[in-house]
Every structure is written in C-alpha cells, then in structure tokens.
C-alpha cells in the first residue's frame, strides 16, 4: 500500500505565546496557512489517516488514537483509504 509523508509543525502564537502544533500530509494546502516562523519538528510515512494519527499520538506520548466510528462501530471508509493531497 502506498504511503504519504505526514509532517508535524510547531509555532508560537504571537498574541498569546501559546505553542501550536499542526499536522498534515506533505503538500497539503494547509501548509500555506502556517506562519513563516513555523518549523517542522517531525515527519513520518503513513498509509492512511488512521495510520497517520496513530503514529502522531505515539510520537507525542498521547493515548491511543480513537477514530470516529460509523453507526456500525467501524471506522469510516474514507479514513482507511490512502491519503491523497
């Protein structure tokens, strides 16, 4: 299964000093919204959204990623498809 590089970015909000994290697939339009002082702090290959979020949570030492589930209790099919930027 093909994989996509996901990037974790960090930047400080200038008005309140809050450190913010942004995480998205490399080449995603969201990259253009980052402030100029943002810096990439980590990247990883992932096959789909759930894989990417699971790896992010592991990297940050957070609890297991809990995907949204449909009415049958299964992850939404779109979350299991390869990510396309």
Image (cartoon, rainbow, N blue to C red):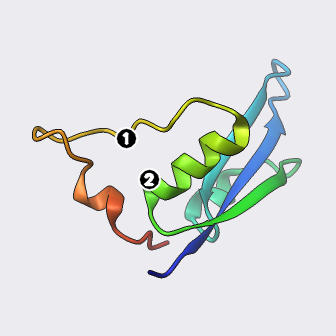
Q: Position of residue 20 (x, y in %)?
A: 74, 33
Between disc 1 and disc 2, whose residue precedes?
2
Q: Position of residue 40 (x, y in %)?
A: 82, 55
Residue depicted at x 17% and y 39%: 73
- Which circle marks residue 19 in the picture? none
Q: Position of residue 47 (x, y in %)?
A: 49, 69
User: Badge 2, how many Cα within 10 Å: few under 14, some, many 20+?
Assistant: many
Query: Which residue sits furthest bottom?
Result: 2
Query: Which residue sits furthest left?
Result: 72
> From the viewer's perspective, is residue 31 above or below residue 3?
above
Residue depicted at x 57% and y 73%: 4
Which residue, given by chain and number where applicable, does mark 2 sit on?
A: 50
- Secondary structure under tag 1 reads loop
Q: Quadrant of the N terminus?
A: bottom left
Left or right placement of residue 81 versus residue 16 in this view: left
Evaluate if marks 1 and 2 touch, with contact meaning CB atoms under 8 Å apart: yes
């Amino acid at each position: 299964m093909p994989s996509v590089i996901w990037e974790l970015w960090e930047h400080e909000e200038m008005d309140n000093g809050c450190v913010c994290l942004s995480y998205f697939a490399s080449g995603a339009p969201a990259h253009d919204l980052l402030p100029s002082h943002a810096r990439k702090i980590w990247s990883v290959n992932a096959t789909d959204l759930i894989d990417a979020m699971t790896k992010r949570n592991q990297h940050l030492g957070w609890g297991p990623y809990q995907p949204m589930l449909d009415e049958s209790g299964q992850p939404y099919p779109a979350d299991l498809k390869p990510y396309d930027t």
